[in-house]
Every structure is written in C-alpha cells, then in structure tokens.
Amino acid sequence: SIHQSWPDLPAQCTANCPSFESITLSLSTMAINKKVLAGCSCFTLLVILSIILFAICMSAYKHLGPDDQVVLKKSTGRYVKNGPWSGQLHPFHERTWRKATTITPQQYCIIQDVLTAE
C-alpha cells in the first residue's frame, strides 16, 4: 500500500541502509585517499618549484667569447668579467654586455687616462 505502518519503517530503514562496518570502512578509505592526494599535491608542488629554480639557475649560465665582456653591477660596486669564460652569473644582478675592440698585431693604440691625463 501507499501508506506503510509505523512498525514496518525501522525494518525497511535497516534493510536499505548500509551497515556500520561498511560506513567505517568507506570513511577510512576516504581518509587514506585524502592522505595520498595530499602527498601527491606536495610532490607536484615540489616538482614545479624545482623546475622553476632550475630554469632560473640555467638562465644565468653564460658563455663569453674571446671578445666579449660583461659588466656586473652589485651592491658593493661594479666588476668586469672578460672572455673567454663559461660559468654561472648571479641571476638577479644587473648586467651590461659589451664587445671588445680587437686589434691585430700590426696595429697599436694610445691609451690616455681621463682623470690624470697620463
């Protein structure tokens, strides 16, 4: 019938509801799945950060040819790195690239100090 009597409802409810053991088993499975998901999330974050750090470090790896020069500006002043050279430059220091003027063995140049006129 459409209307069921009151004493039959608890029997139907227990017949259609999952058992307590299956509920606790599914809850423990969900807890394990959350731990696995959290572990995977941490690992993924670690891999992404490692890739970013690797990219930053490799972008600072430079090769200088025989006529190349780089001027590095640091908080303590400036210094020049002459080529040929290969190595790691600080990725966050300001850099200015220059090509050196080369002369042959038959050429010469006169150098004068601008401050002392020598």
Image (tube, helix red, strand yellow):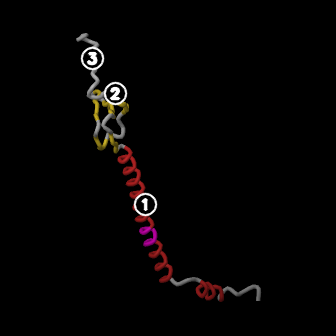
- Checking the image for residue 101, the label placed there is 2
Magenta includes 35?
yes
Q: Residues within 10 Å of mark 3 (few under 14, many from 20)?
A: few
Q: Which residue lies furthest to the top in this view?
A: 117
What residue is pinned by disc 3?
A: 110
Q: In this view, does 11 lie to the left or right of 40?
A: right
Q: Residue 39 in the image: state x and y as whole percent.
A: 40, 65
> Mark 1 = which residue?
44
Quick one: label 2 or label 3, which is nearer the N terminus? 2
Query: Most prominent secondary structure in the magenta stretch?
Result: helix
N-term-proximal mark, 1 vs 3: 1
**Residue located 76% across and 89% down the image:** 1
Up the image or down, 14 lies above or below 41; here it is: below
Q: Give the image location of residue 48, x and y in percent.
A: 42, 55
Who is closer to the viewer here, 98 or 101? Answer: 101
40 and 25: which is toward the camera: 40
Magenta extent = 31-36
Image position of 83 with respect to 34: above or below: above
Q: Position of residue 45 (x, y in %)?
A: 42, 57
Give amino acid for label 3: Ile
Determine whether label 2 and label 1 are within 8 Å by CB: no
Placement of the C terminus among the 4 image quadrants: top left
Task: Give above or below for 32 relative to 10.
Answer: above
Element class at badge 2: loop
How many numbered markers are drawn? 3
Residue found 42% across the figure and 69% down from its top:
36
